[in-house]
Structures are given as C-alpha cells and as structure tokens.
Image: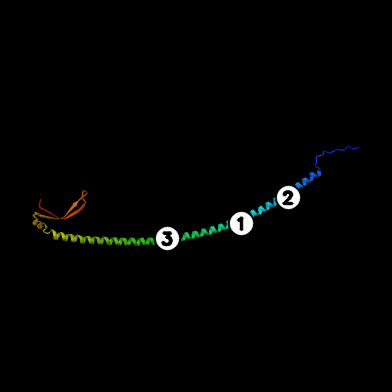
Amino acid sequence: MEAKIEQPQMGLTFEDVWAAIMKTQETIEKSQIESEKSKAEFDARLEKSQIEFEKSNAEFDARLEKSKAEFDAQLKSMREEFKISQARIDAIIDRTQAQVDKTAASVDKLSKNLGGIGESLGALIETLISAKLWEKFDAYNYNFKRAYRRIPLYDENSKILTDIDILLSDGG
C-alpha cells in the first residue's frame, strides 16, 4: 500500500489562492486602467488649461502693447502741446516784458517831467516869496538882515536829507 501523504489542512486550497491572486491582479489592472484614464483626463485638462492660459496671455500681451502704443502716442501729443503752450507763454512773457519796459520808460519820463514842473513851481514860489520876505517881518519887530535859499541838510553819512527853501537870519 502506498503511503498517503496528507497535506495539512489550512482551509485554503491552491485554487482559492490562485483565484484570489487573479482577482487581485484584475483589481490592480482595473486600477491601473482607471489611473491611466484619470491621468489622461488630467493631462488633457492641463493641456487645455495651458492652451487657454497661453491664449489669455497672448491677448493680454496684445492689449498691453496696444495700451503702450496709445500711451506713447498720447505722451508724444502732450509733449508737443506742452512745447506749443510753452512757446505761447514765452511769447506772452516777452510781449509783457516789452510792455513793462515801455511803461517803465514812460513812467520815468513822466516822473522827470512832473519833477521838473514841481521844481519849477517851487522855484517860482521861492522867488516870489523870498524877495524881500525879511522886510515883511519888520512889521512884527523881527530884525532880519539876510535871506538864504535852498540850504541842504545832511545826515551823519553826508547824505542829503532835505533842504530849507528859505532861511531868514538876523545876521547873528
């Protein structure tokens, strides 16, 4: 009789283990397929996002360039307007300065003329009054012997402060 080798009983048979391994492999393969599918979907979304980003970036760059060109054109225009305005202001200042100079010359001339008239009137009055003014004071018992005209008064720096039009003296 042949000896029978008994296998220990573990509760699992080769077929059970093999079926579990096959099921595990099938699950792993399904997970890999789903993972690859998810990765493919992610890659597609990423690529789409990149394309949209690049498109948006290109649109932004185009708008930025357009804005920069418009700004440069406005700045150039403003600079030209400023130059024109500055030239106008300079012309107005020049005309105004010429008018001021002309007016100042007229005022100086008028001042000299008025000063001359004032001096002439002053000299006339002095001549009329000073002629024998001292004799008029004899009626009041003042004994003036001499009359002096245009006596200058100086300050400590020898600058003329004023002058005395008529000075009567009793000789003393």
Residue 96's spot in the image, x, y percent?
34, 61
Residue type indicated by callout 1:
Glu
Q: Is residue 90 above or below residue 155?
A: below
* Image depth: mark 1 or mark 2 in front: 2
Point out the tag, 1 or 2, that comes first from the N-terminus.
2
Residue occupied by mark 2: 30
Q: Of all residues shown, which one is farthest toward the front? A: 11
As drawn, is 139 to the left or to the right of 62? left
Mark 1 surroundings: few (<14), some (14-19) or many (≥20) residues within 10 A: few
- Callout 2 amino acid: Lys
The three-letter code of the residue at mark 3 reads Lys
Quadrant, the N terminus: top right
Give residue 12's quadrant in the image.
Answer: top right
Depth check, front residue: 56 or 113? 56
On screen, residue 90 versus residue 113, left or right, reads right
Task: Name the residue located 81 percent from the left edge and 43 percent from the top edge.
Answer: 14
Measure the C-alpha gap from mark 3 to mark 1. Answer: 46 Å
At 57% from the left and 58% from the top, the residue drawn is: 59
Instruction: Identify the residue position indicated by label 3 in the image.
Output: 83
Badges 3 and 1: C-beta atoms under 8 Å apart? no
| SS state under label 2 | helix
Residue 88 % position (x, y): 39, 62
Q: CA distance from mark 2 to mark 3?
A: 77 Å
* Residue that carries the numbered disc 1 in the rendered image: 52
Q: Earlier in the sequence, mark 3 or mark 1?
A: 1
